[in-house]
Image: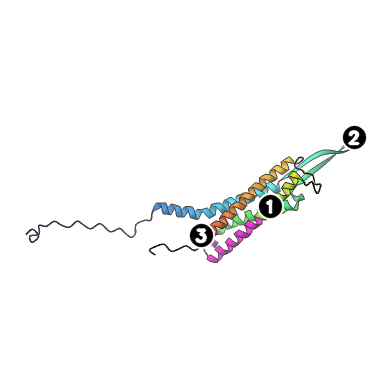
Amino acid sequence: MDVEHGSGKKPPPAPAATSPSSPPCKPRQLRARLVAAQPVVLRAAAAVAAAVAAVVMALDSQSYTAVVAIVGTRPLWQTFTARFSDMPAFVYFVIANAIAGAYNLVVLAVGRLILRRRTACLVVQMLDMVIMALLATGAATAASMAELGKNGNLHARWNPICDRFGSFCSRGGVALVSSFIGVALMLALNLLSAASNAPRPNEPGQ
């Protein structure tokens, strides 16, 4: 028989075993890098938005001259000036945004050193919530004052001022929009931190 004489067909070679040290999938590496970069991008954008809001409001000032009386045939002119420092709500707005911008810049600068420890991460996450609340209250307070300056209050007989200080109100509106963007970015950063710390179910096979 052929089997006895060794002329039988040889069995097909076994498939080569997959090397356990094969490199991970590149899409997974890219996705991991993108996920890791999201907090940095959000924090940098929040710092820029808060800094822009603070600078624009702090530099906001406008003057105009009007006739206040006429003595004989001679008009009396007076110059009126609107500054952010004239209203405590705008002062608080500038302080809140300046603190938020400086805080985020500090965290970006030393983040790699302090965020390696779990305790430091928890402290940063708590401070993120405090900064978000600070920004939100500052923006809301300034927005209420801006609405009063634009529309006035008929019941209290407070006249609007934006018809005379148009540039002042426009620049203040830009600062408010930038600050609310910072609030939204800080909210996204807090939600991302909460999602990353949430317990995950075990994958099948583990």
Find disc 1 in the rendering and name its residue. Answer: 140
Distance from disc 1 to disc 2, alpha carbons, whole Å, reads 45 Å
Mark with earlier residue (2, 3)? 2
Describe residue 189's horizontal placement relative to residue 95 as left or right. left
Distance from disc 3 to disc 1, alpha carbons, whole Å, reads 29 Å
- Residue 149 in the image: state x and y as whole percent: 75, 46
Asked if 26 appears above or below 115 in the picture, the reply is: above
Residue 108 sits in quarter: bottom right
Q: How crowded is mark 3: few (under 14 residues within 10 Å), some or many (20 or more)?
A: few
Looking at the rendering, the stretch of residues picked out in magenta corresponds to 111-135
Mark with earlier residue (3, 1)? 1
**Magenta span: helix, strand or loop, mainly?**
helix
Residue 62 sits in quarter: top right
Taking the spot 78% from the left edge, 40% from the top edge, the residue there is: 64
* Element under disc 3: helix
Q: Residues within 10 Å of mark 2 (few under 14, many from 20)?
A: few
* Colour mapping used in the image: rainbow
Q: How crowded is mark 1: few (under 14 residues within 10 Å), some or many (20 or more)?
A: some
Nearer the observer: mark 1 or 2; the answer is 1
Query: What is the quadrant of the N terminus in the image?
Result: bottom left
Depth check: 136 or 91 in front? 136
Mark with earlier residue (1, 2)? 2
Find disc 3 in the rendering and name its residue. Answer: 196
Q: Which amino acid does label 2 sit on?
A: Arg
Find disc 2 in the rendering and name its residue. Answer: 74
Magenta-drawn stretch contains 130: yes
